[in-house]
Image: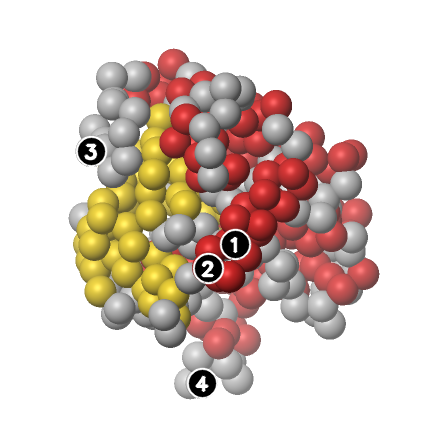
Amino acid sequence: MPADNHSLAGVAAEPGVVKPDPIVKGSKITRQFGGLKAVDVEHLEIQRGVITALIGPNGAGKTTLFNLLTGFDVPDSGEWSFNGTSLQKVPAYKVARRGMVRTFQLTKVLSKLTVIENMRLGATGQRGEKFWSAPFRALWSSQEDANTKRADELLARFKLDAKREDFAGSLSGGQRKLLEMARSLMVDPELIMLDEPMAGVNPALKQSLLGHVKSLRDEGRTVLFVEHDMDMVRDISDWVIVMAQGQIVAEGTPDQVMSNPAVIDAYLGAHHDTDITELDESSLEAAAEAELDEEATHG
């Protein structure tokens, strides 16, 4: 664990544990779809300034929880806050303006706009978007120039500057992930939430993405990400939260969580005397799906 994240050193490895300086807090958050309770989180805290991984088998409720926290979905019950301010009934665009942004498992780049146009759209409070000022370039040109300068700096940082004038739809899957991450930084966020940043990314770009995620923490930002790649989780995470069947079943450092019998239970449905990183991801998913099928058959 990096030296600047020593504040988590004495935190107990247990579900819903209280953190020294949480940037996000949530309690009794539930979301039900028909007869399925997709999210049932009693208490959640995300520590400021660290990289937290949110893991669990398919269908555990990870992305649904992301959607609830960021205003893309509405919970049935519960309360949650960002920097001590409630986010209940706050729409997604206002959540982003407050400094809490997210990316998606399936990237949301605007394919028929160029890369630089996608970046400019990430900036908030643009005077040129207002009805009364849009016809008068003099009122907003300096702001757009500043936004373009920041966008170009970020494109260079993410090694996308050579693609500046290309249509975003022409980028590879990995490059789209990079673009989405770069665009999220246009609002200078405090918290960045990444939904499976490594999904569909070729090995050549994985190390680049890993380095960028670490650099976000080095800048003092907070990162929360959903991921199935256990090697990545162990490599860059300061803290890990494990979900299963909508609930948080374990928390701790990567080493504590990977050897936790409750975590192995969550993936395989039975205790196994092994480390979770030694298990093949496809086998984990197949076993989890088989367990769900069995429950459905006998339920």
Determine crowd level at label 1: few under 14, some 14-19, many 20+ residues with C-alpha closer than 10 A: few
Image coordinates of residue 161 in percent, x first then y, are: 73, 47
Query: Can residue 55 be seen in this snapshot?
Result: no
Q: Is residue 37 above or below residue 255?
A: below
Determine crowd level at label 3: few under 14, some 14-19, many 20+ residues with C-alpha closer than 10 A: some
Amino acid at dot 1: Glu
Residue at image location 28% in from the left, 50% down from the top? 41
Q: Which residue is mark 4?
A: 131
The quadrant where residue 187 appears? bottom left
Labels 4, 1: front one: 1
Disc on res. 294: 1
Query: Can residue 31 be seen in this snapshot?
Result: yes
**Tag 3 secondary structure:** loop
Labels 3, 4: front one: 3
Q: Which residue is mark 2?
A: 298
Closer to the chain start, of discs 3 and 4, is 3
From mark 2 to mark 1, how far is it between C-alphas? 6 Å
Determine crowd level at label 4: few under 14, some 14-19, many 20+ residues with C-alpha closer than 10 A: few
Q: Is residue 73 above or below residue 268?
A: below
From mark 4 to mark 1, how far is it between C-alphas? 57 Å
Q: Which residue is mark 3?
A: 18
